[in-house]
Image (cartoon, rainbow, N blue to C red):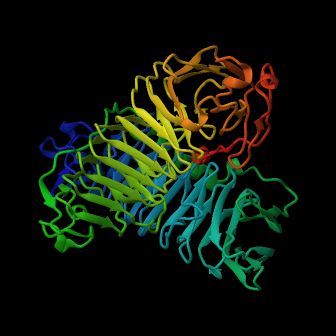
Amino acid sequence: MTTTYWNGGAEGDFYAASSWSYGDIPQSKTCQGADVTGTADSPVVAVAGGASYGQINSLSVGDYGTVKITAVGGSDDAGYVFAIQALQVAQTGSLIIDTPSAVDLGLYTEIRGGTVTIMNNDGNVVLDGNSLNGTGTLNLINSTLGSATAPVHIPDMDITLQGSSTIYTGWDATGRSVTFDPDTVNTLVLPSNDPTVTTAIKGFSENARIEIASEDGVHPTAASVTANGDGSYKMVITLSNGGTLTASDIVPAEGFTPGSVSINETADGNYILTDANASMVTPDYSASTIHQDLQNTLTVATDTGSSVTTSAGVVNHNSAGNDYYTAASGDWSDASNWSAGFIPQSDSCYQGTVDGTSNVVVTQASSDQFVSLSVNDSATLTIEAAAGENPQSYVFSTAGLEVREQASLVVDTSARVELGGVSAIDGKLTIDNNTSNVIVDSNHLSGNGTLTLNNSTFGSARQAQEVDLPTVNLTNNSTYYASLYGNDSTINVDGTSDTIVLSGNLQDIQSTFAGVNANTHFLINPNEDATATSQAYSQNADGSYTLTIGLSNGQDVTLSHIIAASSLSGSASSLSAIASGTDVHSSIQSSFAVAALGSTTATATMTAATIMPDEQASTTGSVAALLGTSQTVTAPVLTNDQSSTTLLAS
């Protein structure tokens, strides 16, 4: 592995070629490392403001060096905006992540006394190994690190929490110390199976939240705080299984005296413990030393590199060589089956090629990205690897993809798979049993082949997919978040509850929708600025149909090439509408009701609506009864990407 070194001066753009030795930007070669090191007299700052899904093999932030990541993903950036395989931060080095977008810090981390600061990020910093190893300081500022399914292992770092931050910690891995900003509400999540937490907990106040992750039904039933006699306290938490969890070293914030502890269950089944202040005087925590120190941390991190003008990110798609799969069939992870003697992920500069009639299966997860994948001739590659330690990590990752005419790539896993940002799909791409976890970094597939979704969701409300392939098949209750502006694909649906979510520019849709039946649904993406308010079907001269969807902004969405399933020909089924989505939006259920009115046009009008994915609200009956009626549905608004679930049923 080669390494490119920072020579961009005191502050500079990470993606300026002139900032690196030999003019070599780190992501310009996927198999090289990057080193950002300064001196005591000349510290340096490299700011990565452009999004790049190209993984850096190794990032070393040396002494007096700072790397600041500010890149924010857009509609064409589905994957990580910055990704590395291995991270090292020296004693006086600093890594600052100031973006709400997804950042991958890799499988291998070694913090040698340095500082990692995460700002304004709600759980989108991924540690493939669920750990930050070494010593130093981790600052969370208005951020969440870890999750209930992926708690982080941080045994020896000092952790600070401010500005509504949350950290999910694993067993015996809570850090050397955890410091709460007493002036803001912050949360430390502990596993219920850790009997003793010896971590020093500082700045403890009524704003500090201790959350217990309820595992196997075990939850807290009582808690008390008692003095240790040296100014510190211990909290003993009684659990429902008869055990206890003890936080033995709690140091209160200035002006706080621990009192009674209240326990409240959260929406996700965890339990939050809050300690009341027994002091008679309400303190001004904003004047406390801890708060002032943490505010200084915020100011320094915000100001660092703020004057640097940044450019777009860089991704390498050129391989140093080709690594061919040489066996007739077998496991991808068997190095003896590859011409180079190693699998493509072992040397990320290599292109992995499966050709001939090989039938290859990927069973072992690897978050290491390689430059490109080619499936040629009549070969088949099936990705079956299950999720690893972190369900947010990729189990298979390539920066680019080609599937040739007779070849086939099958993704048959519920885990996250990255297919890169450039593609040539001339053969078959099949996605089985996967919900929004196949990541196309550019949200764009191109070629002359076929995409088949089987019991799967492709894309999400925030990441609609532009699929420039002749044929897209939806089978077995699949959902397709489709950006169809100017698209002329044929989209086939079967008789199950298939959903097409219309997204982006909703004009000039030339796609053909074939096999449409009473179980087919069209949904306006909840992230659009308009909702569906009406639908009108009319029969074309060739027997096909046009669906016109009226929007709340006064515009229409016209789907002029709808071919009904043969079983619906001349059908007298009633027109119905189902409200659904993650916001105030409405959905249209396919129906053809021509015979019921004796006319080729039927219209149903409804108000905008909100509904949870496992709820349904429908208006049924005769078409005549539907005309001029309206319906309102009230239900909680979803968060995140829960809309990616197949939402609708007849």
From the top left corner, tell me how far across and down residue 431 is, in percent. Answer: 42, 52
Position of 138 relative to 222 (above/below): above
Rendered location of residue 79, percent (x, y): 41, 46
**425 sits left or right of 599 in the view:** left
Against 426, is 227 above or below? Answer: below
Residue 8 percent across, percent down from the top left: 23, 40
Q: Quadrant of the C terminus?
A: top right
Q: Is residue 276 visible?
A: yes
Residue displayed at 49% across by 31% down: 513
Between 295 and 369, the one nearer to me in the picture = 369
Q: Residue at x 60, y 78 (%)?
A: 198
Q: Residue furthest top?
A: 554
Q: Is residue 176 left or right of residue 1?
A: right
Whether residue 253 is visible? no
What is the number of callouts on the image?
0
Quadrant assignment, res 449: top left
Quarter of the image for the N terminus: give it.
bottom left
> Residue placed farthest to the right in the image?
280
Q: Position of residue 633 (x, y in %)?
A: 79, 35
